[in-house]
Amino acid sequence: MKPVYIAAYHQSKFGKLLGMTVPQIIRSAVEGTCREINVDASALDVGSVGSACNMSLNEQGLLSGLMAEVPGLAAKPIEAVENACASGGQAVLSVVQKLQLGQGDTGIAVGYEKMRDAEGKMDGKLIGKVLGYFAHPDERTGKVFIFPHIFAEVMDLYMKTYGVTEADLAQIAVVEYGNAKYNSCAQMQKVQITLEQALKIDDRNRYVVEGLPLKTYDCSQITDGYAGLILATADGLRKLGVAKADCVEIAGYGQATDPLTKAGRDVLRPAGALTAMRRAYDMAGLTPKDVNVAEVHDCFTVMGALGTEVVGKAAPGQGARYWVEGKASVGGECGINTSGGLIAKGHPVGATGVAMIGWSAQQLLGRAPAELQVKDPKAAATFNIGGPICASVCTVLRRAKD
């Protein structure tokens, strides 16, 4: 297949988009990404846009039509995709596959979410309800905040199965808040926590579901934000005037989907996620040992641990220990979620998968903030999920070869 390269990356600051409308968000994402390499949107052949709550929270469908309103993009192959929290990763794969099918040489993948109102306030119960639409109907009964409840059960199972403690998992949040301090786009940039604070129960940190171990600091954020990637074949790079030496190759990718219900399947060894990651490594001709940068979908700290296992940096049940031992730190064996992760960088659902790939590309190009830059970055892996470890999008990235 044709190699596909990341030519440009752009994102908003994650947190609050205030009065921005959905058309403004999509246009800002496209035009902001184009400005990164000083090209016009008319230079792009194809596009894809991902969002999860555009209908339920924004009352807006047909996002592809809004992308086509950006000057230069009318009458081009554009689609909107939804795959829950993996919508952003799915949008990237959509563009990659269009380019490999020969529908063009250049394209843009955009992801966004607008979850707060014009004043930056959120309706927690409403958001909990609409995100719950991405869970199986049989697993919503009796749950007010459906996904925190589902992942609290996963966390409880992980701890009991592997002998992991609340402190082990809380260490993931502590590391990520520490990373977010140096990421100017991170939602929680100005917040720092200690392990003691992450374990202490008070007004800021409480158990989310009675009888289960998940606490506030174990959770990702309710976030507004957008992100965009310009992707191109080798011919496309020449048309854009971008040197291959300044690019990252999407060397491998995989997508797989497990049943929506988590009942009756091994969520601690999710078959779809492991299959998608294996396919990405196989396509790239690389192994987990080759990777020293990763971004994993830590919607909750237990997924930071499981994600570490899915990308192959730790054996089953050893993901949390990998963080406790410092191996996931910027200066460790593999810098994982150096961006701050979903827990501290923020989780604008449809933008998350795009941002994971974009941040990983910045790491490989040596463009991360100095405090977060992994030394001698070799290759990167990303793991983006949707639902209760249901939809999985995985990529493996490396610096472009001349």
Image (cartoon, rainbow, N blue to C red):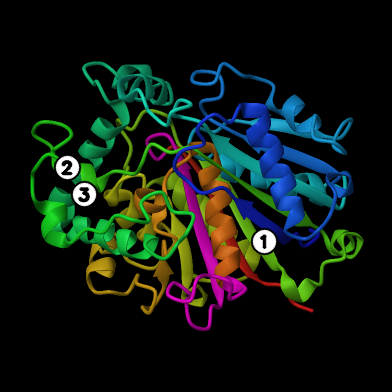
Q: Residues within 10 Å of mark 3 (few under 14, many from 20)?
A: many
Q: Which residue is mark 2?
A: 204
In this view, the residue in front, 174 or 306, is: 174
Residue 240 image point, x, y percent: 87, 60
Q: CA distance from mark 3 to mark 2?
A: 25 Å
Residue depth check, mark 3 versus mark 2: number of the one nearer the observer: 2
- Is 208 placed left or right of 29 in the picture? left
Q: Which residue is mark 1?
A: 250
Q: Secondary structure at mark 3?
A: helix
Q: Earlier in the sequence, mark 3 or mark 1?
A: 3
Residue 241 image point, x, y percent: 87, 65
Name the residue rendered at 35%, 22% in the picture. Answer: 123
The magenta span reads 364-389
Name the residue rendered at 77%, 60% in the picture. Answer: 37
In this view, the residue in front, 39 or 236, is: 39
Residue 387 image point, x, y percent: 42, 34
Magenta region includes residue 383: yes
Q: Earlier in the sequence, mark 3 or mark 2?
A: 3
Q: Is residue 279 visible?
A: no
Q: Residues within 10 Å of mark 1 (few under 14, many from 20)?
A: many
Magenta region includes residue 388: yes
In this view, the residue in front, 316 or 234, is: 234
Residue depth check, mark 3 versus mark 1: number of the one nearer the observer: 1
Q: CA distance from mark 2 to mark 1?
A: 40 Å
Q: Quadrant of residue 46?
A: top right
Q: Which residue is mark 3?
A: 158
Q: Is residue 154 above or below residue 80?
A: below
